[in-house]
Amino acid sequence: MKTFSATPADIDKKWIVVDAEGVVLGRLASIIATRLRGKHKPSFTPHMDMGDNVIVVNADKIQLTGKKRQENFYWHTGHPGGIKSRTKEQILEGAHPERVVFQAVKRMLPGNKLARKQMTNLRIFAGAEHGMEAQKPEVLDVKAINKKNTRV
């Protein structure tokens, strides 16, 4: 018996839309990361970009459990003394609330070139509108997968 290794001709990419309203951030990010890598497919090959294209809507209505809204995101400007921080609550209420979901998904993927390529297949929108109707995306109901995925 031979081990199956996918070639670019074997790859079948779909478009998936996920509604993030009321969904817990970590659970949503792990589902999205699995879909981006393609690990949900039986033909998964670790060195190929097998994943689907994922569209996330309502990223500003994501839920965080516990005191995670007050936790900080840190980054460095590259200058001496240039460490900066913002709480997740400040980012969610600011101009780009989709960055919280982006960072959560990015940190659940491996830190290599393939993961950076797979992140280009992720589109996140703060509101309910997305301009990807031409791709005919299928709806993935994250709330129905497990009742723990949502908080009221």
Image (spheres, rainbow, N blue to C red):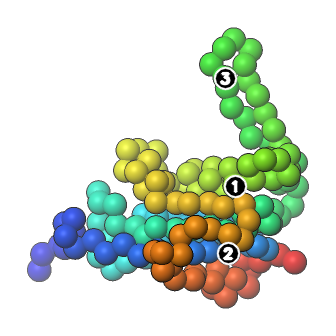
Q: Are marks 3 and 2 in contact (CB under 8 Å)?
A: no
| Mark-to-mark CA distance, 3 and 1 | 21 Å
Asked whether the viewer can see residue 127, the reply is yes
Residue beneath label 3, please?
Answer: 77
Please tell me the numbered disc located at residue 19.
Answer: 2
Query: Where, quadrant-wise, is the C terminus in this rendering?
Result: bottom right
Amino acid bearing label 1: Glu
Check the image and name the residue furthest to the bottom. 144
Question: Can you say whether 37 is above or below 80 in the image?
Answer: below
Instruction: Give the residue at x 62% y 53%.
Output: 102
Amino acid bearing label 2: Asp
Q: Residues within 10 Å of mark 2 (few under 14, many from 20)?
A: many
Instruction: Give the residue at x 79% y 74%.
Output: 22
* Left or right position of 129 against 72: left
| Mark-to-mark CA distance, 1 and 2 | 13 Å
Residue beneath label 1, please?
Answer: 98
Q: Position of residue 98 (x, y in %)?
A: 69, 55
Instruction: Give the residue at x 32% y 71%.
Output: 44
Dot placed on the residue nearer the N-terminal end, 1 or 2? 2
Please tell me the numbered disc located at residue 88.
Answer: none
